[in-house]
Image: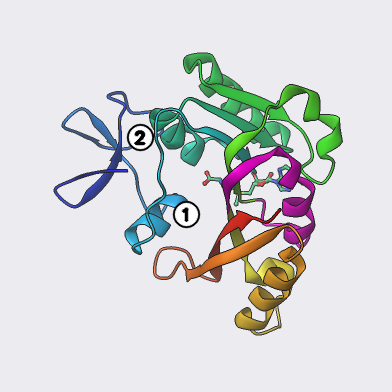
Amino acid sequence: MIWLDGVLVSPGSRSLHGERILRGHRVWDPYRSKLAALAHLGHEVDLPSSLRVLYLGAAHGTTVSHIADYVECVYAVEIAPRPMQDLLSLARQRENIVPVMGDATRPGEYAPFLERVDLIYQDVASPRQAEIAAAHRVFLEEGGTLILMVKTRSIDATADPDAVTRQVTGALASCYRVKAVVPLEPYHRDHRALVCEGVK
Ligand code: SAM
């Protein structure tokens, strides 16, 4: 990841979502992107140019576009039609974004359009987070990484966030080992990032 004078950026000289351009780079706002927040909290993710990424819950493509500034290819899955329109228009401008309209709880429906990837980034704000991550383990290369953004309140609005996180971590155990759990305050309330590696 690239920092210019303490500001996280991605290598693109044209603003896509109104973000500031700093010395020919797009400023990557930690309040708008949980992956940028994770980096600001000391957990930078390696994004080499050869990386292939599967992104679940692409929404309007804000974070997708920054990742795509760095890497070879991003497969971007989104279920909702309105954000999908923005994602399609983004993909028309960027050769390395593959938009997939699909339901992440049913990966079999879009599996033929994917290849195995080095990084799975999941931000679907669903109560079925662990189940979705497990169903996509098959797409992760050996030694690959899963970053799972957990909105604890969308899983259980009344339970203690630590208990919800432990529940998700336990449910992942057969497919992933959780290496770090990072609360995303002050950038994103009630969110935890789980940085995981695939288990064989
Ligand atoms: N990651 C985005 C970003 O940083 O720009 C924000 C993602 S937003 C919190 C969650 C997205 O997941 C929404 O756009 C929603 O439509 C999508 N989503 C929810 N359930 C889904 C599912 N089952 N399959 C695919 N996408 C889903």
Kindly report which numbered mark, 1 or 2, lies closer to the viewer in this rendering: 1
Say above or below: 120 vs 82. below
Disc with the residue nearer the chain's start (1 vs 2): 2
Is 126 magenta? The answer is yes
Quarter of the figure with residue 66: top left
Q: For numbered disc 1, what is the local secondary structure?
A: helix
What residue type is disc 1 on?
A: Lys
What residue type is disc 2 on?
A: Gly
Say above or below: 164 vs 118. below
Decide if residue 102 is on the left or right side of residue 55: right
- The residue under label 1 is 34
Is the CB atom of the residue marked by disc 1 within 8 angstroms of ligand 1's nearest atom?
yes
Decide if residue 114 is on the left or right side of residue 75: right
- The residue under label 2 is 18
Residue drawn at x 60%, y 39% as measured from the top left: 55
Label 1 environment density (alpha carbons within 10 Å; few <14, some 14–19, many ≥20): many
Q: For numbered disc 2, what is the local secondary structure?
A: loop
Say above or below: 36 vs 59. below
Residue drawn at x 71%, y 82% as measured from the top left: 158
Q: Tell me where residue 196 appears, x and y as whole percent.
A: 58, 58
Q: Tell me where residue 6 appears, x and y as whole percent.
A: 18, 52
Q: Which residues are magenta?
A: 124-146
Q: Tell me where residue 62 appears, x and y as whole percent.
A: 48, 38
Q: CA distance from mark 1 to mark 2?
A: 18 Å
How many numbered markers are drawn? 2
Label 2 environment density (alpha carbons within 10 Å; few <14, some 14–19, many ≥20): few
Is 32 magenta? The answer is no
Query: Disc 1, disc 2: CB below 8 Å?
Result: no
